[in-house]
Amino acid sequence: MLEQITILGGLDKSGHPEKIQRIEAAAGEVLAVAGPTGSGKTQLISDIEQHAEYETLTGRRVLINNQLVNKSKDKRHLRYLIAQVSQNMNFVIDMSIEEFLTMHAQVRSIHDPGNTIMKVLEITNHLSGEPVTFSTNLTQLSGGQSRALMVADVALISNAPVVLIDEIENAGIDRLQALEILTGQGKIVLVVSHDPTLMLMAEQRIIMKNGGMEKVCRTTQEERKVLADLTRVEKKMAGLRDYLRKGYSIGQDTDLND
Ligand SMILES: Nc1ncnc2c1ncn2[C@@H]1O[C@H](COP(=O)(O)OP(=O)(O)OP(=O)(O)O)[C@@H](O)[C@H]1O
Ligand SMILES: [Mg+2]
């Protein structure tokens, strides 16, 4: 059972100790990771993914339920708790979506593989718009379609209690929906984002600077109100995006609310 992960600080790019030396996330929490480009967000996600124990560039350590997991063999099972949706997703394996999902479902000992992979396909198409089929080859997928498949796969097949998401906003998919699909009950989700809506959806946000964890902010009541406004605007934007990219013109074709 996953209860919490802990990140113990290391060094920033200049070799100075990070300002933040300890971050804890409990089951059910969403954390955002923010900061300028090149400030070390992806590196932080990758430290967690690798269960860093001093050996990465940053010298950080990552504990699961207060334990280091890499070194001791009997704790290796804890390593399968983490799934990642990465920033530059592209499949290079030459196989169909069906073969890939069936294989993954087998590895993960999914109880009802046929039904599960069907749902994965449904969610993929729901997120990406331009539908794919079971026989579509992985190498034919666009960036957004790959990302949508990854999100659905992580949600239903990996079904890991820790989910790491690197910049979902550039994926051309509905990111609020994707986040909703990924933040299941009791999961710890870390989401790298340049976007205020996603930052405020998290309980805490880690601010990165010069490769180090510089500050941690908890989302305030005031910020939650701002989030409610942003979400309304966001939904309207999503509706408009969908409408315009289907080729409709505002005021000329069918009503926007149809
Ligand atoms: N503490 C550190 N010590 C040394 N190198 C670091 C440290 N943190 C990050 N780096 C390196 O700095 C570079 C930029 O970091 P990273 O890719 O994580 O930035 P980013 O915040 O994800 O940027 P973007 O927003 O453009 O995706 C990488 O090569 C990374 O390995
Ligand atoms: Mg990055």
Image (cartoon, grey):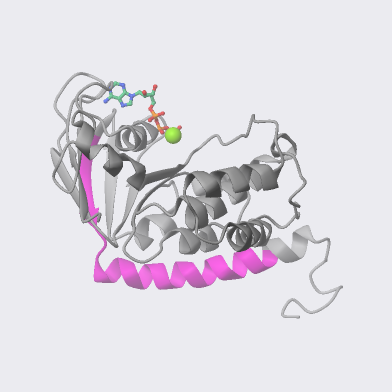
What percent of the width, then of the height, locates residue 155? 49, 56
Specify the quadrant that holds the N terminus.
Answer: bottom left
Is residue 90 highlighted in magenta?
no
Q: Is residue 47 above or below residue 254?
A: above
Task: Identify the residue shown where x is 73% and y is 51%.
Answer: 134
34 and 29: which is toward the camera: 29
- Give the residue displayed 74% in from the left and 39% down from the top: 137
Depicted 201 relative to depicted 213: above or below: below
Instruction: State left or right for residue 251 relative to residue 188.
Output: right
Q: Is residue 69 visible?
A: no
Image vertical order of residue 84 relative to residue 250, above or below: above
**Quarter holding residue 92:** top right
Residue range in magenta is 213-240
Q: Position of residue 211 (x, y in %)?
A: 29, 28
Q: Does the magenta stretch mainly form a helix, a strand or a loop?
A: helix
Q: Position of residue 159 (x, y in %)?
A: 43, 55
Looking at the picture, how far across and down is residue 66, in whole percent? 13, 45
Q: Answer with the quarter of the image where residue 115 lies.
A: bottom right
In reply to whether residue 238 is colored magenta, the answer given is yes
Which residue is nearer to you in this view: 36 or 98? 98
| Quadrant in which ligand 2 is drawn | top left
Residue 144 visible in this rendered orientation of the protein = yes
Quadrant in the picture for the C terminus = bottom right
- Relative side of 152 to 163, left or right: right
